[in-house]
Each structure stands twice: as C-alpha cells, then as structure tokens.
Image: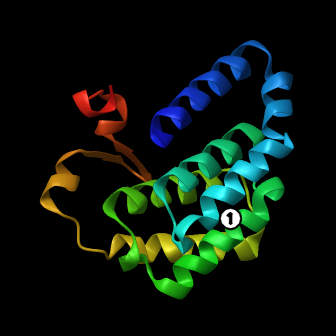
C-alpha cells in the first residue's frame, strides 16, 4: 500500500512539476513531507524501500541534495554501519536509484564520495537470477522493469 501511495505522489509531483513547477517545489518543502520521511526512515530500525523511494522523489523534485542532506547522510550511515548485504533486493535496487539521483544533482564532495563508495559496494553484491532478468542497465542508469508494470497484487 505504501508503494502505491508513493507512486500516486510521484505522479502528482510529476504533473505539478510539468504544469506549475513552483507549486511542486512548494509541495516538496512542506513539513508533513519531512515528517513522513522521518517516519519511514525510523520504522523498524531498518531501511525500507518506501523510505528510499520517497527520498529519491524529494531529491528529484527539489533539484538538490542540500535540503535533504541530513536524511541522505543518515541513509549512508545506516548502510556503512550495517552493510549493504542486510538489505532486501528491492531496497538494494531502490538504494541504487536514490544514490544515482543524488549524485546527479551535484551534492557536496564529501557526500558524493560516500555515495559513490556505497554504489561501488552495491555492484559487488550477488544478484539473484530473477532480479537481473528484470533490470535494464544503460551506463550508470538502472531501471527495474517491474516499476512499469501492474500485477494483480497491486490492485
């Protein structure tokens, strides 16, 4: 359900960004967004795919890491402390997308180096046969094909 809600929020943000970019920017700055992100990041003391998806969305639509630096650093800390092997396949994929998005918007050099180090460690994780069949990789960009399909479980 959280994934579906995030997809709806992503669609709404994309629509607003195309029609009225200022409104999309204003929406990203709302206190309830930060509260939602905090709640998702602190849930069960582990990184969930939903929290990483929301953080990716916020970085994308705000156009910078600076507003979300604390949250990005906490994600990096968590990965550095627990290791990438503690993540589920879905979270690993979402983390890769988040780090790629964050690196694309010119983060500070110290944070960029941390994120690139984590990205490098993710490359060395063993991939399951099922996950590699559903991934499209072009250069540094990875797209999960299941992000573009609807299954009966999602309904």
Instruction: Between residue 27 and residue 131, name the one nearer to us.
Output: 27
| Residue 30 visible in the current orientation | yes
- Label 1 Cα neighbours within 10 Å, binned few <14 / some 14-19 / many ≥20: many
Quadrant housing residue 70:
bottom right
Determine if residue 64 is in view.
Answer: no
Query: Which residue, given by chain and number where applicable, does mark 1 sit on?
Result: 72
Q: Secondary structure at mark 1?
A: helix
| 133 or 57: nearer the viewer | 57
Q: How many marks?
A: 1
Of 9 and 100, nearer the camera is 9
Q: Residue at x 71, y 37 (%)?
A: 61
147, 36: nearer the viewer? 36
Task: Give above or below for 9 relative to 131.
Answer: above
Quarter in which the C terminus is drawn: top left
Q: Is residue 70 left or right of residue 122?
A: right
Q: Residue at x 35, y 65 (%)?
A: 88
Q: How is the image coloured?
A: rainbow
- On the rendered structure, is 7 left or right of 155? right
Report x, y in % for residue 114. Answer: 62, 77
| Residue 1 percent across, percent down from the top left | 45, 38
Pinpoint residue 37: horizontal percent, then vertical percent. Answer: 68, 53
Q: Residue at x 70, y 49 (%)?
A: 36
The residue positioned farthest toward the left in the image shown: 129
| Residue occupying the point 54% across, 48% down | 53
In percent of width and height, residue 9 lies at 61, 30
């Amino acid at each position: 359900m959280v994934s579906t809600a995030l997809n709806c929020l992503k669609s709404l943000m994309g629509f607003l960004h195309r029609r009225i970019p200022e409104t999309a920017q204003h929406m990203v700055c709302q206190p309830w967004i930060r509260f939602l992100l905090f709640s998702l990041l602190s849930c069960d003391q582990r990184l969930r795919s939903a929290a990483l998806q929301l953080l990716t969305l916020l970085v994308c639509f705000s156009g910078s890491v600076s507003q979300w630096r604390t949250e990005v650093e906490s994600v990096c800390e968590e990965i550095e402390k627990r290791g990438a092997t503690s993540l589920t396949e879905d979270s690993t994929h979402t983390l890769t997308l988040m780090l790629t998005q964050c690196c694309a918007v010119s983060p500070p050099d110290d944070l960029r180096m941390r994120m690139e180090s984590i990205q490098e460690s993710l490359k060395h994780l063993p991939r399951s046969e099922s996950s590699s069949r559903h991934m499209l990789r072009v250069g540094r960009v990875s797209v999960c094909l299941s992000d573009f399909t609807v299954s009966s479980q999602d309904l």
